[in-house]
Amino acid sequence: MTGGMNGEDASGRRARRGGSGQQPLKQVESRAPGWLIADLNPVSRNSRSVRRREWLQSDRSEPAFGSRQERWQLIVKGRVQGVGYRAACCQKARELDLNGWVRNLPDGTVEVQAEGAVQALTELRLWCERGPELAEVLSVVHGQLHPIREDWFEIRR
C-alpha cells in the first residue's frame, strides 16, 4: 500500500525497498556545533523497521591559524587617554568576538588583554596601532599570556 511521494505509506512511514533492507546513512546538521544527527534505518526486526537517531561527533577541522586560542597583552603608548580609546577598543574587540578587558594605566598608557582566535587578535592589534580618530598612537608592545577563558570583553577602571 505504498502511496504518496518518496515511497511513504499512508501512515507516513517509509516503505521497505528491495535489497539489504538498510537505507544509506543520512546526515543532517544539528544546531549544536561539532555534532551531526545521523538517521539510521537498521535491519528489520520481526518484519518491522525500527527508526532511531544517534548523535555522532563530527570532525570539523578549521584552519589552524584561525582556530588556535591565545591571550595577548597589548600596551598602547601615545596620546591614548581621554580620547575614547577604551570604548572604541572594547567595541572593536566585541565585533571580533574576543574576550578580555581594556584599562588606563597610571603612566598614561592603555593596557589591553584579549583572548580568542589568532586572526582576530591580529586584527585587534592592527586596530590598536591606529586607534580611534582623536588618538595618536606611538607604539604597541605585544606580549602573550596563558588563556583564562573569559566570556566577555569589558572596560576596567
Image (cartoon, helix red, strand yellow):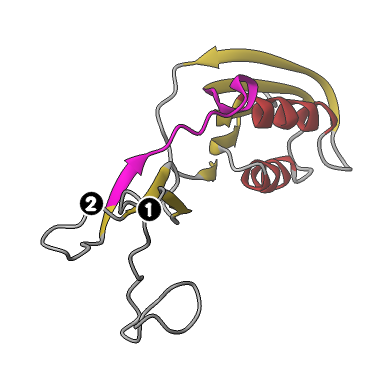
Q: Is residue 146 visible?
A: yes
Q: Amino acid at mark 1?
A: Gln
Query: Could you say which is closer to the camera, residue 69 or residue 128?
Result: 69
Above or below — where is 63 with respect to 96? Answer: above
Q: Which residues are magenta?
A: 54-69
Q: Position of residue 10 (x, y in %)?
A: 35, 86
Query: Which quarter of the figure has residue 102?
Result: top right
Pointer 2 residue: 43
Pointer 1 residue: 23
Q: Earlier in the sequence, mark 1 or mark 2?
A: 1
Query: Which quarter of the figure has residue 62?
Result: top right
Q: How many marks?
A: 2
Above or below — where is 145 with respect to 35? Answer: above
Query: Could you say which is closer to the camera, residue 146 or residue 39?
Result: 39
Q: Position of residue 12 (x, y in %)?
A: 35, 80
Relative to 15, is 99 on the left or the right? right
